Amino acid sequence: MLETIQCATLPTLDAKLSSCILFSDAMNHASMIQSICHSGAKYVISKYNDLLDLEAKLKQHPKETHKIVTFESIKSMCNSVGPIKKTCDLAKQYGAPTFLSEVCHIENDRKVFILNINVSGLHCWPVQSP
Protein backbone atom coordinates (compact mmCIF):
# COMPACT_ATOMS: atom_id res chain seq x y z
CA MET A 1 0.00 0.00 0.00
CA LEU A 2 2.73 2.47 0.97
CA GLU A 3 4.56 1.81 -2.29
CA THR A 4 1.38 2.69 -4.22
CA ILE A 5 1.03 5.98 -2.34
CA GLN A 6 4.66 6.88 -2.99
CA CYS A 7 4.45 5.89 -6.66
CA ALA A 8 1.41 8.12 -7.14
CA THR A 9 2.42 11.05 -4.92
CA LEU A 10 6.01 11.74 -5.96
CA PRO A 11 5.34 12.06 -9.73
CA THR A 12 2.28 14.23 -8.96
CA LEU A 13 4.36 16.56 -6.78
CA ASP A 14 6.97 16.81 -9.52
CA ALA A 15 4.32 17.67 -12.12
CA LYS A 16 2.56 20.23 -9.90
CA LEU A 17 5.78 21.94 -8.83
CA SER A 18 7.15 22.40 -12.34
CA SER A 19 10.16 20.11 -12.20
CA CYS A 20 11.32 19.80 -8.64
CA ILE A 21 14.37 18.05 -7.21
CA LEU A 22 13.78 15.22 -4.76
CA PHE A 23 16.38 14.74 -2.03
CA SER A 24 16.57 11.24 -0.56
CA ASP A 25 18.52 9.62 2.25
CA ALA A 26 20.69 6.79 0.94
CA MET A 27 19.10 4.32 3.39
CA ASN A 28 15.48 5.06 2.52
CA HIS A 29 13.55 1.87 1.86
CA ALA A 30 14.09 0.38 -1.60
CA SER A 31 10.44 1.04 -2.51
CA MET A 32 10.88 4.73 -1.75
CA ILE A 33 14.12 4.96 -3.75
CA GLN A 34 12.38 3.18 -6.64
CA SER A 35 9.43 5.61 -6.44
CA ILE A 36 11.85 8.52 -6.56
CA CYS A 37 13.73 7.08 -9.53
CA HIS A 38 10.49 6.47 -11.46
CA SER A 39 8.90 9.81 -10.54
CA GLY A 40 10.42 11.63 -13.50
CA ALA A 41 11.92 14.24 -11.18
CA LYS A 42 15.60 14.98 -10.80
CA TYR A 43 16.89 13.48 -7.58
CA VAL A 44 19.86 13.74 -5.26
CA ILE A 45 20.90 11.07 -2.77
CA SER A 46 22.46 12.20 0.51
CA LYS A 47 24.52 10.11 2.90
CA TYR A 48 22.73 8.06 5.55
CA ASN A 49 21.30 10.31 8.32
CA ASP A 50 23.91 12.95 7.43
CA LEU A 51 22.34 16.39 7.71
CA LEU A 52 25.60 18.14 6.81
CA ASP A 53 25.70 16.25 3.52
CA LEU A 54 22.01 16.98 2.90
CA GLU A 55 22.59 20.68 3.56
CA ALA A 56 25.61 20.77 1.23
CA LYS A 57 23.45 19.25 -1.50
CA LEU A 58 20.54 21.62 -0.86
CA LYS A 59 22.94 24.59 -1.09
CA GLN A 60 23.99 23.55 -4.61
CA HIS A 61 20.59 24.53 -6.01
CA PRO A 62 19.14 28.05 -6.27
CA LYS A 63 16.56 29.02 -3.67
CA GLU A 64 13.86 29.41 -6.36
CA THR A 65 14.30 25.76 -7.44
CA HIS A 66 11.49 23.56 -6.10
CA LYS A 67 12.94 20.99 -3.72
CA ILE A 68 11.35 18.20 -1.68
CA VAL A 69 13.23 16.35 1.06
CA THR A 70 12.05 12.73 1.22
CA PHE A 71 12.88 10.58 4.21
CA GLU A 72 11.58 7.91 6.55
CA SER A 73 10.67 8.07 10.22
CA ILE A 74 12.39 4.73 10.74
CA LYS A 75 14.97 3.39 8.34
CA SER A 76 13.41 -0.04 7.98
CA MET A 77 16.49 -1.26 6.14
CA CYS A 78 18.51 -0.95 9.37
CA ASN A 79 15.94 -0.29 12.17
CA SER A 80 17.21 3.18 13.07
CA VAL A 81 15.16 6.29 13.74
CA GLY A 82 15.93 9.22 11.47
CA PRO A 83 16.50 12.76 12.77
CA ILE A 84 12.91 13.80 11.97
CA LYS A 85 12.75 17.26 13.58
CA LYS A 86 16.25 18.27 12.45
CA THR A 87 15.51 17.11 8.90
CA CYS A 88 12.27 19.13 8.83
CA ASP A 89 14.03 22.20 10.26
CA LEU A 90 16.81 21.95 7.65
CA ALA A 91 14.34 21.50 4.80
CA LYS A 92 12.36 24.53 5.97
CA GLN A 93 15.55 26.61 6.04
CA TYR A 94 15.94 25.91 2.30
CA GLY A 95 12.25 26.35 1.45
CA ALA A 96 11.76 22.64 0.81
CA PRO A 97 8.65 20.78 1.93
CA THR A 98 9.21 17.30 3.32
CA PHE A 99 7.76 13.95 2.27
CA LEU A 100 7.88 11.66 5.28
CA SER A 101 7.31 7.98 4.63
CA GLU A 102 5.95 6.50 7.84
CA VAL A 103 6.70 2.93 8.80
CA CYS A 104 3.79 1.12 10.43
CA HIS A 105 5.85 -1.14 12.63
CA ILE A 106 9.36 -2.27 13.38
CA GLU A 107 10.78 -5.35 15.01
CA ASN A 108 13.54 -4.88 17.52
CA ASP A 109 14.81 -7.57 19.88
CA ARG A 110 11.76 -9.73 19.13
CA LYS A 111 9.35 -6.96 20.15
CA VAL A 112 7.10 -5.22 17.67
CA PHE A 113 6.45 -1.52 18.01
CA ILE A 114 3.74 0.57 16.39
CA LEU A 115 4.91 4.01 15.36
CA ASN A 116 2.63 7.00 14.99
CA ILE A 117 3.84 10.45 14.03
CA ASN A 118 1.42 13.34 14.20
CA VAL A 119 1.33 16.99 15.17
CA SER A 120 1.67 16.19 18.87
CA GLY A 121 4.94 14.33 18.36
CA LEU A 122 6.39 10.88 17.94
CA HIS A 123 4.72 8.02 19.79
CA CYS A 124 5.95 4.44 19.92
CA TRP A 125 3.95 1.65 21.56
CA PRO A 126 5.12 -1.91 22.15
CA VAL A 127 2.65 -4.58 21.05
CA GLN A 128 2.61 -8.32 21.41
CA SER A 129 4.28 -10.25 18.65
CA PRO A 130 2.18 -12.87 16.89
Image: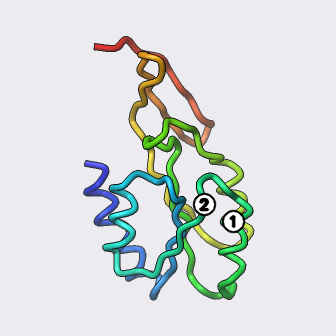
Q: Which residue is mark 2?
A: 47
> Callout 2: 10 Å neighbours few (<14), some, many (20+)?
few
Determine the CA span between mark 2 and mark 1: 6 Å
Residue pointed to by mark 1: 53
| Mark closest to the chain's N terminus, 2 or 1 | 2
Residue 110 place in picture, x, y as percent: 41, 16
Give the number of callouts.
2
In the figure, 34 relative to 76: above or below? below
Q: Residues within 10 Å of mark 1 (few under 14, many from 20)?
A: some
Between residues 98 and 22, which one lies in front from this camera angle?
22
Amino acid of disc 2: Lys
In the figure, residue 80 lies in which quadrant? top right
Q: Give the numbered dot on residue 71.
A: none
Q: Quick check: 27 left or right of 5? A: right
Q: Pointer 2 and pointer 1: residues touching (CB < 8 Å)?
A: yes
On screen, 81 above or below 92?
A: above
Q: Residue at x 54, y 69 (%)?
A: 23
Q: Amino acid at mark 1?
A: Asp
| Residue at horizontal 50 percent and vertical 60 percent from the top | 99
Screen quadrant of the C terminus: top left
Question: Which residue is located at x 59 percent, y 34 percent?
Answer: 122
Please provide percent x and percent y for residue 94. 70, 73
What SS does tag 2 mark?
A: loop
| Residue 30 image position (x, y, % from top left) | 36, 55
Describe the element under mark 1 as helix, strand or loop. Answer: helix
